[in-house]
Image (cartoon, helix red, strand yellow):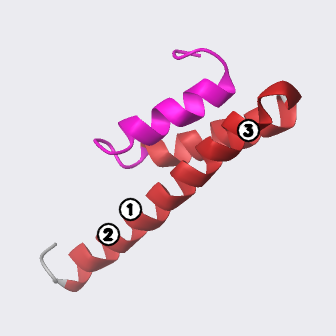
Amino acid sequence: MLFGDHANQSIACAVIGLFCGFMFLFGLYAGIRAYNDLPWKRTQAIVGIALNAVGCVLLVLLLIARASGLGL
């Protein structure tokens, strides 16, 4: 892990996802893995999952808007 354990990686991917949207998917995976494997960091894992889920939704909406020609 580049940024520590899975919980830290998940939150870092949410920030990096702002520049490279596909990092949200990896952050979501890392958050789920942290939730399952690290019971003492479940709060951080939940925050990471929530941030990355919102990022994934925004990524999908932007891709749909781009494909439909709205020019966003």
Q: Nearer the viewer, mark 3 or mark 1?
A: 3
The residue under label 3 is 43
Sequence-wise, which precedes: disc 3 or disc 1?
3
Sort mark 2 into few (<14), some (14-19) or many (20+) by Cα contacts within 10 Å: few
Instruction: Residue at 48% x, 30% y: name it.
Output: 12
The residue under label 2 is 63
Magenta residues, as a range?
A: 1-22
Sequence-wise, which precedes: disc 3 or disc 2?
3
Q: Amino acid at mark 3?
A: Thr
CA gap between label 3 and label 1 equals: 24 Å
CA gap between label 3 and label 2 equals: 30 Å
Secondary element under disc 1, as helix, strand or loop, is helix
Secondary element under disc 3, as helix, strand or loop, is helix
CA gap between label 2 and label 1 equals: 6 Å
Instruction: Residue at 22% x, 74% y: name it.
Output: 66
Q: Does residue 6 appear to the left or right of 42 in the view shown? A: left
The residue under label 1 is 59
Q: Quadrant of the N terminus?
A: top right
Q: Amino acid at mark 2?
A: Leu
Residue 67 falls in which quadrant of the image?
bottom left
Q: Work out whether residue 26 or residue 45 is closer to the camera in this orientation and state it.
A: 45
Q: Nearer the viewer, mark 3 or mark 2?
A: 3
Q: Amino acid at mark 1?
A: Leu
Q: Does residue 62 appear to the left or right of 36 in the view shown? A: left
* Labels 3 & 2 near each other (Cβ < 8 A): no
Residue 13 lies, in percent from the top left, at: 47, 35
Residue 29 lies, in percent from the top left, at: 65, 42
Secondary element under disc 2, as helix, strand or loop, is helix
* Labels 2 & 1 near each other (Cβ < 8 A): yes
